[in-house]
Amino acid sequence: MVLNTVVLWVHILGAIGWLGAVMVFGMVVGPSLPGLSGSTRVEFSARVLPRYARYIEIFSIITLVFGVAMVAVITDGDFSMMSPSTPFGLYISIGAVLSLVPLGLVFAVVIPSAHRIAGMSEALMKTPGPPPPELAAASRRLRMGSMAGMALLILVTIFMVAGATL
Ligand code: HEM
């Protein structure tokens, strides 16, 4: 019972941290960046994006690892509970499989783009000049990966809550 509560708590903490960060970045920070001066934007990208990438990396892994641990604790070896013939098994399984897509986006798109933007911004801080075209392309990839990840994570949360409560 205590183990169940602790694992669920960490799983939900991970989910709040992951989805919350993606939402704040996608809906508040990202849209505010074009309004900043070029040098402020460059400094912000160089200093904040590597930390953001590390944060997303940690919270997405915590969510997934403790989600799988949750299944292990709840089922206690009897995986019939996870059968898609029960609402619990069906919704949690759909949510879990679906969550692999935003996880893939984090590691294949969001983190590499964030590091690329931070690297180019660092170079621009040392040697100011016109931003390279790859900077705009990487920013576009970061924005699109983040928005797609956010939409999918909201969907995953709907399935998780439906599975746990229906
Ligand atoms: C491999 C991936 C995942 C697995 C195996 C998994 C597994 C689970 C399980 C078994 C529960 C039910 C706990 C219970 O009934 O007490 C649960 C709850 C929950 N999950 Fe996941 N999960 C995964 C990914 C995610 C993701 C990516 C999110 C959102 C970002 C998420 C958000 C939630 C939330 C909010 C609950 C609590 C629902 C409630 O108590 O109303 N999960 N998860």
Image (cartoon, rainbow, N blue to C red):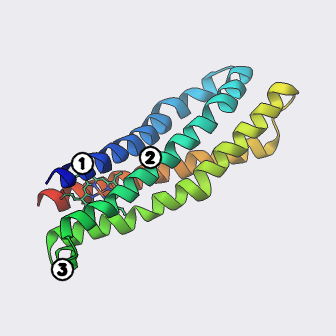
The reply, left or right, for residue 13 in relation to residue 121 is left
SS for dot 1: helix
Q: Secondary structure at mark 2?
A: helix
Earlier along the polypeptide chain: callout 3 or callout 2?
2
Residue at x 17%, y 74% (from the top left corner): 81
Image disc number at residue 140 = none
Q: CA distance from mark 3 to mark 2?
A: 29 Å
Image quadrant in which you'd find residue 130: top right
The residue indicated by pointer 1 is: 6
Q: Position of residue 135 (x, y in %)?
A: 75, 42
> Can you give x and y, in whole percent of width and height, for residue 21 in the image?
44, 38
- Residue at image position (68%, 44%) is 115
* Residue 128 makes an appearance in the image: no
Rendered image: mark on residue 59: 2
CB of residue at label 1: within 8 Å of ligand 1? Answer: no
Which is closer to the viewer, label 1 or label 2?
1
**In the image, what residue type sits under mark 1?**
Val
